């Protein structure tokens, strides 16, 4: 699958497929932009299952985010990017931190969002996610990128792995050296720390919320509150899936395709 690189307003993207646009807001990658090998691998894996019959735009935050950036400001940049496509309202899918931005986008800029899919995210950060992300941001700001990367990596692979980050941080020094400046990562984390859908305008878009039963960062109570805050939302919880693995396998793209196809059918009746 060939990926085409481009820029929509200020946001870099990788795109593939043909048809109705789907704006895919990535989770929290270490680097801004879409030029790294990790971004390309993530984009390819994200786009391929969803690109049948639609053009998927995989977007990631831009570089140069200042301290004090808000999720509302990031959502406004995404709204500008969608408007620049000149395709009218587009369907939006947001994963994890991208899901926080997608919620703010749909609340603040309803005219650019068609249908909304939220994956591994909720109406605000859960306590575990907030504690973890604050730690990562503090390590970046303190000039300890190897500790920040170790904390993120270990939190994904082990239930209490982030507690080992100090011990294994030296192993991440080569990655930190290649990563360079991670201040954009810290700015995004600090922005999400203040996000709360309960303080936003009501989301009007038809919404699908997809979560893993074993997601350690967004528990059932938080997911159910998210459903209550989005009147036209449906929650699908996949058994035996976690925060990252919820998108693995055929069930995820089939669920998203079914939701979008059903909404298309309803709109033409």
Image (spheres, rainbow, N blue to C red):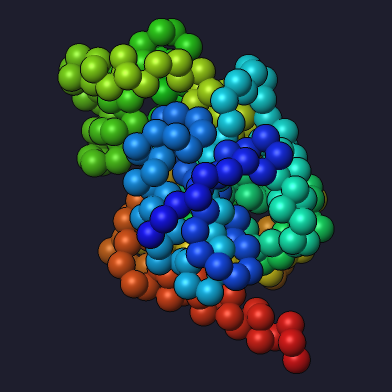
Residue 10 position in % (x across, y down): 67, 35
251 up-or-down from 154: above or below? below
Front residue (pair 229, 253): 253
Q: Total number of numbered labels?
A: 0
Q: Residue at x 34, y 46 (%)?
A: 41
Side of 247 where 134 appears, left or right: right
Task: Report the residue at 28% width, 29% height from top.
Answer: 162
- Image quarter in which the C terminus is found: bottom right
Camera sees residue 129: no
Q: Residue furthest top?
A: 143
Residue 62: horizontal and vertical position, in percent? 58, 31
Residue lying furthest bottom: 269
Viewer-closest of 263 and 227: 263
Q: Is residue 75 above or below residue 228?
A: above
Q: Position of residue 64 (x, y in %)?
A: 60, 21
- Please identify the quadrant where the N terminus is shown: bottom left
Instruction: Tell me residue 66's x, y (percent).
Output: 64, 18
Q: Is residue 25 left or right of residue 177?
A: right
Give the residue at x 62% y 63%.
Answer: 21
Q: Quadrant of residue 228?
A: bottom right
- When asked about the image quadrant of residue 18, the answer is bottom right
Residue 48 horizontal side relative to residue 53, left or right: left
Q: Residue at x 71, y 65 (%)?
A: 114
Residue 10 appears in the picture as rendered: yes
């Amino acid at each position: 699958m060939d990926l085409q690189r481009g820029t929509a307003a200020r946001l870099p993207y990788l795109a593939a497929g043909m048809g109705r646009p789907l704006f895919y807001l990535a989770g929290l990658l270490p680097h801004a932009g879409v030029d790294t090998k990790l971004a390309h691998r993530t984009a390819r894996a994200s786009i391929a299952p969803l690109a049948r019959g639609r053009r998927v735009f995989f977007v990631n935050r831009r570089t140069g985010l200042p301290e004090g950036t808000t999720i509302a400001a990031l959502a406004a940049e995404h709204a500008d990017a969608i408007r620049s496509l000149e395709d009218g309202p587009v369907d939006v899918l947001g994963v994890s931190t991208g899901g926080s931005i997608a919620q703010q986008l749909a609340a603040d800029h309803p005219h650019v969002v068609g249908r909304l899919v939220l994956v591994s995210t909720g109406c605000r950060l859960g306590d575990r996610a907030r504690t973890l992300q604050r730690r990562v941001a503090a390590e970046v700001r303190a000039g300890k990128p190897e500790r920040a990367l170790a904390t993120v990596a270990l939190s994904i692979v082990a239930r209490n792995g982030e507690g080992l980050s100090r011990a294994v941080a030296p192993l991440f020094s080569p990655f930190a050296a290649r990563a360079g400046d991670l201040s954009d990562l810290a700015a995004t984390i600090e922005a999400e720390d203040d996000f709360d859908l309960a303080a936003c305008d009501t989301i009007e878009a038809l919404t699908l919320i997809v979560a893993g039963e074993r997601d350690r960062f967004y528990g059932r109570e938080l997911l159910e509150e998210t459903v209550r805050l989005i009147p036209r939302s449906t929650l699908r919880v996949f058994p035996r899936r976690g925060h990252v693995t919820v998108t693995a396998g055929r069930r995820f793209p089939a669920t998203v395709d079914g939701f979008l196809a059903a909404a298309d059918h309803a709109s033409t009746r």
